[in-house]
Structures are given as structure tokens and as C-alpha cells.
Amino acid sequence: MPTPKLPTGPLKYAPFLFKPNLKPSSLVDPIKLLKISAETKNLRLGKILHALLITSNQPSKNGHLVFQTNSLIYFYVKCDEISVARQLFDEMPERNVVSWTALMSGYLHNGLALEVLRLYKKMVSLDGLCPNEYVFAIVISSCSDIGRVEEGKQCHGYVLKSGLVLHQYVKNALICMYSRCSDVDGAMRVLNTVPGYDVFSYNSVINKLIELEYLREALEVLDRMMAECVVWDNVTYVAIFGLCARLKDLKLGFQVHGQMLKSDLECDVFVSSTMVDMYGKCGKILYARKVFDCLRNRNVVSWTSIMAAYLQNGYFEEALNLFPKMEIEGIMPNEYTFAVLLKSSAGLSALGLGDLLHARAEKSGFKEHVIVGNALVIMYSKTGNIKEANKIFSDMIFRETITWNAMICGYSHHGLGKEALTVFQDMLVAGVCPNYVTFVGVLSACAHSCLVQEGFYYLNQLMEQMGIEPGLEHYTCFVGLLSRAGLLDEAENFMRSTPVKWDVIAWRTLLNACHVHRNYGIGKRIAETVLHMDPHDEGTYILISNMYAKARRWDGVVKIRKLMRERNVKKEPGVSWLEIRNITHVFVSDDNKHPESSQIYEKVGELLAKIKPLGYVPDIAAVLHDVEDEQKEDYLSYHSEKLAIAYGLMKTPTGAPIRVIKNLRMCDDCHRAVKLISKRILVPCPPPTCQRILITACGAPCLWDLMLWKSSIGRLCYPDFDDTALRQGKRGVVLRKGQWKAEEDVSAVNPFKEVWPQETQAPFDPNATCRDQKAVLSSLGKQA
């Protein structure tokens, strides 16, 4: 007869299971094995032991029977067989506190917190047992899981009466309950009245305080941890680095980083990723990259963190360039990665790249995530495709406040004020509570549509009803609304009477209005105010110089330019560029460095000749130089945007969109010329970082921009476009803000090239980046 194979694992401790004639001498062996089975979740062995205990028929006292049944309940609870555990519990003729505790912990472990509370009431009312510290810890944790703060407070009172509040389990449970129920006062009260907490309790309080934006209170808890010499763990460092990022406190971040290095704590990838995020939000992208480069094992969180750091600091192309490198290491992107990449594409106004990322996200199954949907709405809004943004918004099943804000601001930035207000009304009907950002978009929409009464209502009544305190951005939008409506005196009185610390942008908004409406009296006062606040603000000098030039006060122009030279204030040159077949072509006014400059000049002349019979007359008033009229016309003919548009028409097939990028606002003459070329009226409207020029049907008012931002975005369509094709968004040109550094050979400059400080070097090889985005496009194109 073959020898049976000896068992392994927990079964090797139960020889009586394989020898029928061998009886266990006591209950110790099967109970110990039940505990092992529970810890290893070995359901088969536990059932065998359960059967053995039933068939052994050993006489035992009630105490032994309770002990045995408690062990079985604990085993079945650990193996997630909660119904079997409850059956055993209900059949027990006698129970003790351990019996109730075992079953309650099982319900809590399986997410049935309400059953825990019901059992607790039965325990106190029916059996008359006195709960111990473990029961209270379980019951309070159940209140935490389901947000029953009132029941938790009752348990807190019972704990105080029973004198169990000093037990570590109970203290931790109370702190977690108040924190998770967002009762910050309760959590701080417990923290201040009961001494001796471990790191787990402190982590719970700090994380909840940071989540609820009680950042100063979180710093106080951190000071208390240090005073009590509590040893920090990885969770603590993640929370504290996140706190430094929220506060943008680089000094504190350095101190925490130094303490972590001294503690010899093994830094995991999540702590390092939080450090990268902290340095990124504090504007130290080099430090963020160094931390990232020191990581041995990178995951999707660390890659997304460094991409987000580049995004937050305006290095959009560098964020995109990391994507193919991440995939080379075999790391697959998640929904947060796609959100960062889409926002980077929006920052570059790279619609083609955004389309590829959209397809890739959809293929990867992340399109339905709300964070990806939000990023898609933002990307399409900022790249000029507002119709696609609306389609994404309409198809989203779940929308949060950020989603509504993105759509409202998208319409507002495109000059579609009425559409933005319609979305806002839909938001209120849907029961979504607007926030601070929502009203910035709403007031901006009112400004674009010159809705003074509506803007006054939203600012002074609706925001108060919603409990939102108006901030500088809201007041600046209202100043822009009054200025657009030509109410310059009212705008100045509003600014001087409102107790707000106005910034340069707000005053320059009104100064720009004075320039447009040629109210030089108010303009002079405002200019003095702006220059007093920022003597090196170049935009203000340019505005004052233009005001003098339009009034033909050339002595004033000379005086302002002399003042600029004395104060070393330099005007940023206007540059336009466009990308054709992944090659960037850069133009400046009267540029002759391009290899095809002669053909470009011929094309410009051809376009101007075609629009002159349509009523185009060069706006020589836009030339702010004291020269002859004929020379002024020559200046106007070859502005950088005209050269870029002409080259785009030369090199792209008929019907293909032309996307021209410009770092400054279009002049009035180029504005009128493009209107005639496109046979549409252009309506300027400003996003927070640029001016976007949209085409509307003939007869729409031509409004000036709300704030003088150093950029310009526009859309241009060809003469053969009809209104239907235009509304469908099939063709267009978009001019948008780009990062640009002036050099002698402007045509050789890549406008997206990252400019590092001269005293430092980038912590990676700049030659490894794909400046023309070929690697990014190739990587996406193969998989989208």
C-alpha cells in the first residue's frame, strides 16, 4: 500500500486529520489551527476543523463552548463568510463581549456599517453587556464609514463616562471619525483634550485638514507632532509635501525634505512623486526633475507628477515630450496622465496633437472619466474648436462643477456670451452649485455681450445669495464690462471707491478702454497710477505712446520712448509663426530672411489687391510713427501676421485650415484686412492668457478686448466659405500665444523652445527632446 503524501502548509500541524484513530487530546490543537486558517484564509481547512469539532462530541463547559464558537465566528469572518458567522452567533445559547466584537468586526470588514450599529444596540439593550475598548473602536469606525457623526458623538460621550477614552484604539477611532465626517472642530477638540496619539491619528487629522483647506490648522498639528517627537512615516511625508504644495511654501518643503533624508526612511515612489509635485507647484522645475531622475522604480504616478510639474510652469512641450519616454519604459498612462497631456496641448494650442491624444484616450478606455472629459473640453476650447468642446460636454454622463466651468469659460473666451450664460442657467437647473471660478466666466461673458445690468446682478446679488465673496478677478471683469460699454467715468469711480487692492492688469484694462474710446483725460490719470504701481510695465508705455500717436502728439511719443530707454524697458517685437508638416516658419514685420520671401511678398500684394475693391483702405492711423502716408502703407502691408497667412495659403491645399500663432495682439489694420479676406466680421474676446478672434455672421458688433494681454488668437476662413461651413467649424486659422525668445536670426528660433535660466542647466539632455513634436506625433499616431 503506497505511503500517503505528507501534507504541507497549515495541514502539517494536524496529524489527527489524517489518522482516524488519533483523537485530539484537547481543544487547543483545532482552535490554534482555526486561527491559522483564519489568518491564511484557508476555508477548506477551517471547514474540516469545524466538522471535527462537531463530530468529536467532547463534553465541554459553557465557557469552552463560547470560546470554541467565538473562534469559529472569527474564522468565518476572516474568510468573508459573514452569513455563516451570523448563523453561528444567533445559535449561541450564551455570548460574551468577544462574540459581539468578532461579529461586529466582520460586518465592518465587509462594509456593513449599519449592521454594526444595530448589533451594538442589541448588545447594550438585550444582553446588558458592557462594551470594551475594542467594541467602541469598531462602532466609532462604523459611524466614520457611513458619516453618522451624531451617533459617533453619542459613542464619544459613552466612552468618556466609561473611562476608555485613553485607549489607543479608541483615540484613533475618534480622531478618524471626526476627520472623515469633516467635523474639524471635533477632531481638534479630541486632539487637544486627550494626550498621546500615534502617527496614524495625526496622519488622519492632517490629511482631512488639507482636504478641507484648513492649511494653517494642519501646520499647527504638524508642530504638535514635532513637539511630541512622533516619528513620521511615508504617509506623513506624503501629506506634508502636499501641504507645502498647497501653501507654495518652498522653505518648509526644503526643511521637510532635509528631515526625511536625515531620518533614513526608505522613500517610496509615492513620497518621491509628492516631492516632484511640491517642487513643481513652488516653481522649482529643476528640483522636481532632479528628484524624478533619482527615482529607480518609476510608475505612472511619478511620470504624471513630473508632466504636471512642467505643465504648471508653462513648459508644455517638455510635458508632451515625456510621454513617449514613459511608454519606452513600458508604463501605461492613466486618466490623470491624459488629462495633463491634453492640458499641455491646450497650452500650445496644438489642436492636431490634442486630436491624437483624444483618440488615444478613447482607445485606452479613459474617455468616460470625468477628469479626461474636463481636459478635453478645456483643450478644444483653448484651441479654437468650440463646437467639439460643446459636443464633448453634451456627451458627458457625469458632470462636476469643473466641467460646467470649463464650458462657460470656453464660450466666454470665444466671445459667445449668451451661450455661456445659457450654460450657466442649465448648471443652476441641474442643481450644481457654482463656485468662485464659475462667476469669473459668467462676468466675463457679460462683458463680451455688454450686459451691464445682468453683470451688476450677478456680482452684487447672486454671488451674495450663493455665499461667494467677490474677488479681484470678478471686479476686474466688471471693470471690463463697464469699459466695453463706454462707461469710463463709472469704471474709474468704481475702481477708486471699491475697497479692493487692484493690480496692474485691472488698471490697464481701463487704460486700454481710454485708448479705444480716445478719452485721454482719464487715460492720463490711469497711466500715472499704473506706472506708479509698476514702472517697468512695458504694456503701459506702449499704450501711452499709442495714445499720443493717435492724437498726433509726436513729442509725447518721443518722450515716452526716451523714458523707456532710460528705464531699460524694451518693447517685445511682434512675431507670427505657423507649423506646416511639423516645420515651424517664423515671420516678423518686413521679414526678408525666409527663403521664399519674394513669393510671400507677391502673395501679400495679391491678397491686398483683391480686397481693395471690397472697401479695404490701409489704416495709416495704426502706424504710430511720424512718417509719410505712403511709407505708412508699406509698413502696414507686411506685418508678420499678413506674411504668415500668405505663406499658409501658398503651402496648404485648398480647404485646409491655416493655424497662425502670434505673440502680440493684432493691429487694427490687420484686423480689417482679415475681415475682408474672410468676408466675415471678427469679434475679439480674451481668455485669461490670450485674445481669441472669432468669426461671426455679418452685422455682429466689433468689440475690443477686455484686457491688454500680450498675445492674440484668431480664426480666419477663406473667401469661398459660407455661414454653414463656418458654424460647423470645418475651416479656420487660429493665432495663439507661444513661448518665444528674441534672437538675431529670428527665422531660426523655435518658439516652443524652453528657455532655462543662464546660471543653471537643464537636468536632462536638451538634444533628446523632440522640438518639432515628431516623436510625440509618431508615438500617438501609431496607436491612435
Image (cartoon, grey):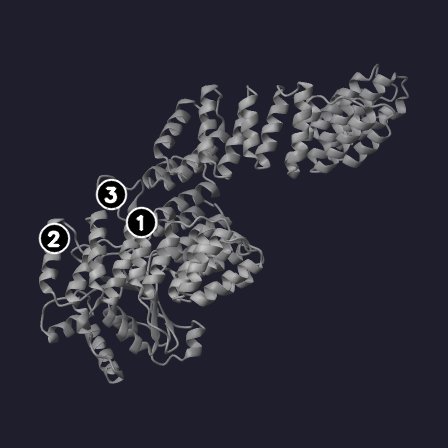
| Residue annotated with mark 2 | 563
Compared with residue 704, is residue 764 higher up or lower down, i.e. above or below? Answer: above
Horizontal placement of 28 versus 405: left or right?
right
Give percent across and percent down for residue 613: 24, 85
Front-lying residue, 693 or 255: 693
Q: Quadrant of residue 630?
A: bottom left
Give percent across and percent down for residue 754: 29, 49
Q: Can the viewer see residue 781?
A: no
Q: Secondary structure at mark 2?
A: helix
| Residue annotated with mark 1 | 502
Q: Quick one: label 2 or label 3, which is nearer the N terminus? A: 2
Q: Quick one: label 3 or label 1, which is nearer the N terminus? A: 1
Estimate how packed mark 3 is, as few (under 14), some (14 to 19) or many (20 or more) residues with alpha carbons within 10 Å. Answer: few
Identify the mark at residue 778; answer none if there is no mark: none
Asked if marks 2 and 1 touch (Cβ < 8 Å), the reply is no
Give percent across and percent down for residue 638: 19, 71
Horizontal placement of 250 versus 201: left or right?
left
CA gap, disc 2 and disc 1: 25 Å
User: At 83% across and 27% down in the image, what residue appears?
Assistant: 126
Q: Secondary structure at mark 3?
A: loop
User: At 79% across and 32% down in the image, what residue appears?
Assistant: 85
| Disc nearest the viewer among 2 and 1 | 1
Front-lying residue, 456 or 372: 456
Estimate how packed mark 2 is, as few (under 14), some (14 to 19) or many (20 or more) residues with alpha carbons within 10 Å. Answer: few
Q: Quick one: label 2 or label 1, which is nearer the N terminus? A: 1
Estimate how packed mark 1 is, as few (under 14), some (14 to 19) or many (20 or more) residues with alpha carbons within 10 Å. Answer: some
| Disc nearest the viewer among 2 and 3 | 2
Extreme residue toward the top, this view? 25
| Residue annotated with mark 3 | 757
Horizontal placement of 313 versus 99: left or right?
left
Give percent across and percent down for residue 560: 13, 57
Compared with residue 162, is residue 388 higher up or lower down, i.e. above or below? Answer: below
